[in-house]
Image (tube, rainbow, N blue to C red):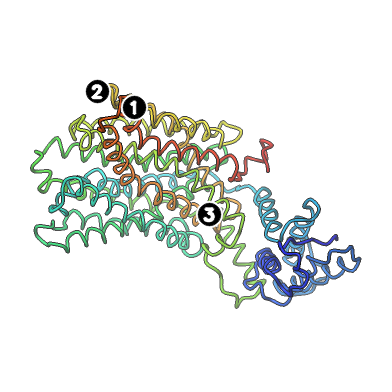
Amino acid sequence: MKPLSVDTGSPDSDECTRGNAAATADSASANTFGVSSPSSPRILNLTDALQGSSSNDDSTGGNYSNALDEVVDEVSPGSSSGVSDGDPRDQYKRRGNNFAQSAASSSAYSLTMAEAQMKYEEESFYSAPENEHGDDNIWGLLSGVMGNIYEWYDFAVYGLLASEIGAAFFPQSSKKLQLINSFGVYLAAFLMRPLGAIFFGELGDRLVGRRNALVFSIVLITVPSVLMGLLPSYEVWGAAAPILLVILRMMQGLSVGGQLAGSYVLSVEQSTSRNRGFRGSICDASSVGGFLLASGITTAVRHIFTEEQVNDWAWRVPFWFSLLLAPVLYHIVGHSEESKFWEDRNEQKEAEQVIREEEHAQTSAVVDLVSSPFRRRQLLGMVGVLSATTSSFYILFLWCPIYLSDLRGLLSEANAGLMNFFIVGMFVFLLVVGGKISDSFPHRMDSMRIGLAGIVVACPVMFALFESESATGYFLAQLQLCCCMCLTHGSVAAWEVELWMSDPSLSFTGVAIGHNLAATLFGGTMPLIATFLFYRGEELANREDSDDFIGLLARMLPGLYVSALACVALFCISVVIRHPHDVRTGEKK
């Protein structure tokens, strides 16, 4: 084979014994063969042989062939003669040759070894076998649906009661600071979600499987939810009350970090390819259904009880309501099955471990994910795309009711909550329609691009329509953003899982980390950023030299922030992300 010229970026690189490029090459070769240490002598020999020299030395091919045989002996001991097509040694030889061909096929052989590894992993991603275990199992879908409703009901109740909770646990602050402090506790739960993603990703990918990880996440959120409804206020326990509130909220965040991703993965892996978008959208709609249920219960509480009773004690009622859902949920989860796609791949990897060296400890799923340059790029692009979907979701369904009632005084809290309830209900229906539509597109990301372009325009327009001073205008403002979001959100669940489906032993971790990083960075911070932009806009709008146009732009600042994130998402989905549908639509990079 022809030698690969490795670009070290230094004219004196030939004088270096093992420079940065060589070290990168060692890691790339080790990752290709699943060897834990890139400093293995045989890996170092293989790297040297693969790099070769700058001249066309005929001995290079022979050196590489001998080095490859030595590495195969290390990762798969045994005789190299008479192997069958399915022999693991033969598979590792093909893997090494594919990696070498990817490296050598670059223009003028100018790729670094890291770039060659990226190209090899990208080709492996596109050539991964299709999931043939999908059977549209109904119990797996119901398990994810009910689990999402339960978890997201508990999680959303806090945000919808933020003003009452702020008054109960931060009474010495002004109303403005009470709301900000309450949203600060809200953010604390989001900070735990990436840790929950790593924890539950390891459980779901490497230890107990998707189903059991979901069961544990449900148990973990039940206890803090009930305790939050029983927790004494600041007037009774003093400073200990808000501290315990933060701890309980963080426990909720840890649980949610695994629940939604687990339901996505379990449901989509059990789906046939023609129904992934539809079934994934049902899972997503169920999480929104949790918000809908939370919105309905909190709205009912505000209408049944007086404002004084709600501020005093009735805000606790929605937290207690979650106990009624638990028995139904555990019955459904008990009937669900494990993902056969994951079980099959898990058994295959265990067999490969035995064939290699039994004493090699298995690395964690998150280490395997971040050690791959291709997967790191997928993760970065995924977070970029989800920045728009997450921020638009939380600004519409969580912050807008507070904006219309507490911040602007355009509607009462009860009427703002009632309007939000109807918007969420329409979103649930349209979300499933959007998921079904995404299955009919040749490329699933096309429907997402349409929705993202709509969000760019619709979110600032929503805040402009809030200036109409009409209840009809307020409703239509939210509805037009809701319709744009459905095309994007309806595809998200299937899209997230498909990004990682080439390796089901990492898919739970990939979906969970990507989804929860975006939720933390752009969902958890949304109420704080939107509230800051609102007060900043009020200052600009109330300046003596501001005209009507400047005042309108100032009021649109929270929407313009989401619009900017949607532009970032469009770039990531078009340039950064790789998707299996690239092959069938001719968009393979």
Q: Is residue 545 left or right of residue 412?
A: right
Whether label 3 touches label 2, CB < 8 Å: no
Residue 188 visible to an observer of this rendering: yes
Query: 428 above or below 74?
Result: above
Figure check: 282 above or below 76: above
Which residue is the site of mark 2?
469
What is the three-letter code of the residue carrying label 1? Ala
Question: What residue is disc 1 on?
Answer: 464
Few, some or many residues within 10 Å of mark 3 (<14, 14–19, 20+): many
Q: Residue at x 54, y 57 (%)?
A: 506
Question: In which quadrant of the rendered view does residue 444 lie?
Answer: top right
Q: In x, y percent, where is residue 71? A: 74, 72
Secondary element at image label 2: loop
478 with respect to 20 (left or right): left
Nearer to us in this view, 325 or 293: 293
Q: Residue at left 19%, top 59%? A: 242
The answer to which image quadrant residue 574 occupies is: top right
Label 3 belongs to which residue? 507
